[in-house]
Image (spheres, coloured by chain):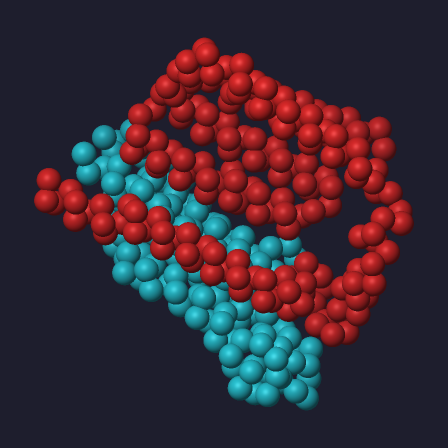
């Protein structure tokens, strides 16, 4: 248990340092790379929490794809962050402090990590997914059973969201952009 | 310019097939281990993007033409939604995979999940690659 706490603590310290570095740096390429590091560290924390599927997604999307797209996006704009005028610093700090305080206040309502008897564990659906899915769907990975079968309608919606987002970006950057460049 | 990239090029040539193979493993082994269509699609796209980063956008476009990824994006969604309508036509509810093989519902579930995950993977991989193509093409035009 102490080792678990130690590894978690070290990972959270790395996360905090990375976040501070991202906030302080003006060089946006370095910020994009540090964003990848942030995602990779989060993925390690998810593995420790036994959320392997989430960790997998975070590592592939957050550390891999987002970093590449951020770097590609930086090719379209300038690579240094503009300085914020100092008079905006006080309202920004207030908003950040307020949001942070709200989030910390909300965590007080969460059950402790691994606590028994939480609604997640007592709800009959948990039993259905973990026990009956072996008979009904027959897949060893319950996450896949839930995502693709029990909640297949949601996953269809998610796929449509990805498709729509892709279409949106293509309309903004793809063919429309090319035509404008030709007429210039 | 390409002489000093030879280490990168050799390593990339070794890595890309392994990345694509791993993506296929994640795609079709998602029922048993962690992963599934979404992660597999991203990993597959990452392999192609790595190739594009090292060998250039034009080389990547010869391997995976933009027209192909543009068709892949809606094809995945159609595959997923089509499975839903197929189960309706077979007399069940939308996405009720039991209907694919009424004698062995578990087998039907297995097949249905495999098909819809393939649809997810296809849409995700195509979307990621075409996003990268459109970003990279605009960045190099100046």
| Residue B65: quarter of image | bottom left
Q: Residue at x 44, y 66 (%)?
A: B76
What is the quadrant of the C terminus of chain A in the image? Answer: top left
**Is residue A137 visible to us here?**
yes
Please identify the quadrant where the N terminus of chain A is shown: top right
Q: Position of residue B142 (x, y in %)?
A: 18, 34
**Nearer to me, B69 or A76:** A76
The residue lying toward the viewer, choosing from A92 and B125, is A92
Q: Furthest-right residue in view?
A: A117
Asked whether the viewer can see residue B108, the reply is: no
Whole-percent x, y for residue A87 in the image = 46, 12
Hey, which residue is sitting farthest top in the picture?
Answer: A86
Left or right: residue A164 compared with residue A144: left
Horizontal side of A135 relative to B52 (left or right) equals right
Identify which residue is drawn at 44% across, 62% down: B122
Q: Position of residue B28 (x, y in %)?
A: 56, 64
Q: In this view, does B76 lie to the left or right of B63?
A: right
The answer to which quarter of the image holds residue A115 is top right
| Residue B1 on image: x %, y % | 23, 30
Residue A154 appears in which quarter of the rendering?
A: bottom right
Q: In the image, what residue occupies the spot 35% across and 45% down? A: B132
**Chain B's colour?**
cyan
Residue at x-position 53% and y-position 62%: A157
Q: In this view, does A177 lie above or below B102?
A: above
- Please identify which colour was used for chain A in the image: red
């Amino acid at each position: 248990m102490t080792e678990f706490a130690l590894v978690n603590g070290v990972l959270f310290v790395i996360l905090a340092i990375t976040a501070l570095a991202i906030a302080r740096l003006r060089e946006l390429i370095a910020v994009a790379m540090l964003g990848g590091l942030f995602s990779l560290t989060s993925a390690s924390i998810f593995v420790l929490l036994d959320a392997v599927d989430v960790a997998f997604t975070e590592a592939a999307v957050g550390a891999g794809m987002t970093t590449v797209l951020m770097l590609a996006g930086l090719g379209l704009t300038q690579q240094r962050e503009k300085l914020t005028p100092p008079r905006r610093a006080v309202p920004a700090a207030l908003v950040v402090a307020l949001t942070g305080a709200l989030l910390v206040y909300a965590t007080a309502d969460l059950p402790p990590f691994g606590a028994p008897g939480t609604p997640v564990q007592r709800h009959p659906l948990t039993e259905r997914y973990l026990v009956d899915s072996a008979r009904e769907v027959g897949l060893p990975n319950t996450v896949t059973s839930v995502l693709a079968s029990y909640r297949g309608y949601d996953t269809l919606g998610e796929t449509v969201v990805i498709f729509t987002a892709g279409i949106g970006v293509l309309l903004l950057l793809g063919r429309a952009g090319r035509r404008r460049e030709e007429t210039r | 310019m390409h002489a000093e990239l030879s280490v990168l090029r050799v390593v990339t040539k070794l890595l890309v097939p392994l990345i694509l193979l791993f993506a296929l493993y994640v795609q079709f082994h998602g029922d048993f281990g962690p992963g599934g269509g979404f992660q597999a699609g991203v990993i597959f796209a990452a392999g192609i993007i790595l190739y594009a980063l090292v060998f250039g956008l034009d080389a990547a476009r010869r391997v995976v033409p933009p027209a192909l990824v543009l068709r892949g994006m809606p094809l995945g969604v159609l595959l997923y939604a089509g499975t839903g309508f197929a189960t309706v036509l077979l007399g069940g509810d939308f996405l009720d995979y039991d209907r694919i093989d009424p004698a062995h519902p578990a087998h039907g579930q297995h097949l249905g999940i495999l098909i819809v995950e393939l649809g997810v993977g296809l849409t995700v991989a195509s979307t990621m690659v075409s996003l990268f193509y459109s970003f990279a093409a605009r960045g190099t035009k100046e």
